[in-house]
């Protein structure tokens, strides 16, 4: 029998649940308050466990509300035993328990008594534990266990509803985003990849690409700040506005000017970042304009990579924004456009993520599908949507 903590299907289910490394889930706070009150325990946790640590999707009483712990390594997890055994763990005094005596959580966290039950998804995967904790010995009753079972089922039901909602939104997003395909009428090779966040709080990332009549290539990558269906609908409307602007405007500056005026009229687009670029029909030069979005990463023919940060301008609809178009005349091996989900990680400076992308992108330009390779390598652990577009000269 394999290790349940490292079971691939369980880990995939955990990530899809939205509980894995998510922000504190306020919806579970009333359940924890009820559990601690009924069981007479000072601490309650909705804890999910992967193969490296445990994350508290919600917590009560472990630390002050304005300074949550957020999780611990597996070394300090009682909840991992609930996942491994797929059954409740009921311990009145861990110091006297053969299995748990000497456990680091006793000395470091003050966990003396523990009562936890499995949280399962609809397919039966054990995602973690709904548990109550006491800092002194506590005799748990059979009714206590049943109370926690009922509350764990409420957590599972919430996860199931949100997962179905997320599936619906992802389907809508995938239908909206274009397939870049292949074109013989432009001297540029194009690749695009989209990876939705694996939870209900999906966002509004999008890209659009079009080959001009002269063989030039137009690329737009945007991010509507927000989550859920509202952000997806707003994203679709903004993408439509991009198409309209492209049809009536003849330059990047004119396109963005149209979008600056259109964005405030779209519900849900209170803040949207966007980068637009045009790659010339000569297969050599390109120009871009960035509005509150990640700067494009330009990979030179010598393999060095740099970000075009000098022409960053405010997001769409920003009052008084001055837009500047930057022209690139030097030969390039490729240009990478990405939304912030590719590089941003909680608790990490964004410069670290940007450096990570700059380090790996040059080596992936020759992959069969560099956009997908970059998205899969750097976006696998993202808590946000990820969109990547890669443009290379066709030579």
Image (cartoon, rainbow, N blue to C red):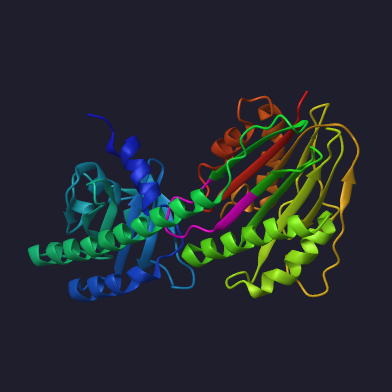
Decide if residue 53 is in sight here: yes
Magenta segment: 195-207
Residue 164 image point, x, y percent: 34, 56
Examine the structure image and report whether residue 114 is included in the region drawn in magenta: no
Residue 386 image point, x, y percent: 57, 48
Of 109 and 394, the residue lying toward us: 394
Residue at 56% across / 49% down in the picture?
A: 177
Residue at 83% across / 74% down in the picture?
A: 320
Of 74 and 119, the residue lying toward us: 119
Residue at 63% across / 52% down in the picture?
A: 340
Which quadrant is the N terminus positioned in? Answer: top left
- Decide: is 273 above or below 86: below
- Decide: is 90 above or below 31: above
Image-quadrant location for residue 36: bottom left
Residue at 19% across / 57% down in the picture?
A: 93
- Count the marks: 0
Which quadrant is the C terminus positioned in? Answer: top right
The residue at the far left in this view is: 142
Examine the structure image and report whether residue 206 is included in the region drawn in magenta: yes
Image-quadrant location for residue 166: bottom left
- Decide: is 253 above or below 319: above
Looking at the image, residue 316 sits to the left or right of residue 159; the answer is right
Looking at the image, residue 249 sits to the left or right of residue 59; the answer is right
């Amino acid at each position: 029998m394999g290790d349940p903590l490292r079971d691939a299907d369980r880990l995939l289910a955990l990530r899809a649940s939205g509980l894995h490394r998510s922000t504190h889930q306020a919806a579970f706070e009333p359940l924890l308050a009820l559990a601690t009150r009924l069981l007479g325990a000072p601490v309650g946790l909705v804890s999910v466990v992967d193969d490296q640590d445990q994350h508290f999707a919600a917590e009560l009483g472990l630390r002050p509300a304005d300074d949550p712990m957020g999780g611990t390594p597996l070394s300090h997890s009682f909840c991992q035993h609930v996942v491994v055994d797929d059954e409740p763990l009921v311990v009145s005094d861990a110091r006297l328990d053969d299995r748990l005596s000497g456990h680091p959580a006793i000395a470091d966290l003050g966990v003396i008594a523990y009562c936890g039950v499995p949280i399962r998804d609809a397919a039966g995967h054990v995602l973690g534990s709904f548990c109550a904790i006491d800092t002194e010995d506590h005799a748990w009753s059979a009714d206590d266990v049943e109370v926690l079972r009922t509350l764990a089922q409420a957590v599972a039901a919430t996860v199931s509803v949100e997962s179905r909602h997320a599936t619906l939104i992802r389907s809508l997003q995938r239908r909206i985003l274009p397939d870049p395909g292949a074109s013989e009428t432009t001297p540029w090779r194009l690749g695009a990849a989209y990876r939705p966040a694996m939870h209900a709080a999906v966002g509004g990332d999008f890209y659009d690409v079009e080959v001009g009549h002269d063989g030039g290539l137009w690329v737009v990558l945007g991010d509507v700040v927000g989550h859920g269906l509202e952000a997806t609908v707003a994203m679709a409307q903004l993408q439509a506005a991009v198409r309209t602007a492209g049809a009536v405007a003849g330059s990047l500056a004119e396109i963005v000017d149209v979008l600056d005026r259109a964005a405030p009229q779209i519900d849900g687009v209170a803040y949207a970042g966007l980068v637009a670029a045009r790659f010339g029909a000569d297969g050599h030069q390109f120009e871009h304009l960035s509005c509150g979005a990640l700067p494009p990463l330009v990979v030179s023919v010598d393999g060095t990579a740099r970000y075009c940060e000098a022409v960053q301008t405010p997001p769409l609809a920003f009052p008084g924004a001055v837009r500047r178009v930057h022209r690139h005349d030097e030969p390039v091996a490729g240009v990478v456009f990405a939304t912030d989900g590719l590089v941003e990680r909680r608790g990490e400076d964004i410069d670290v993520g940007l450096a990570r992308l700059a380090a790996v992108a040059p080596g992936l330009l020759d992959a069969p599908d560099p956009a997908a390779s970059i998205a899969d390598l750097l976006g696998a652990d993202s808590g946000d949507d990820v969109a990547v577009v890669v443009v290379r000269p066709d030579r």
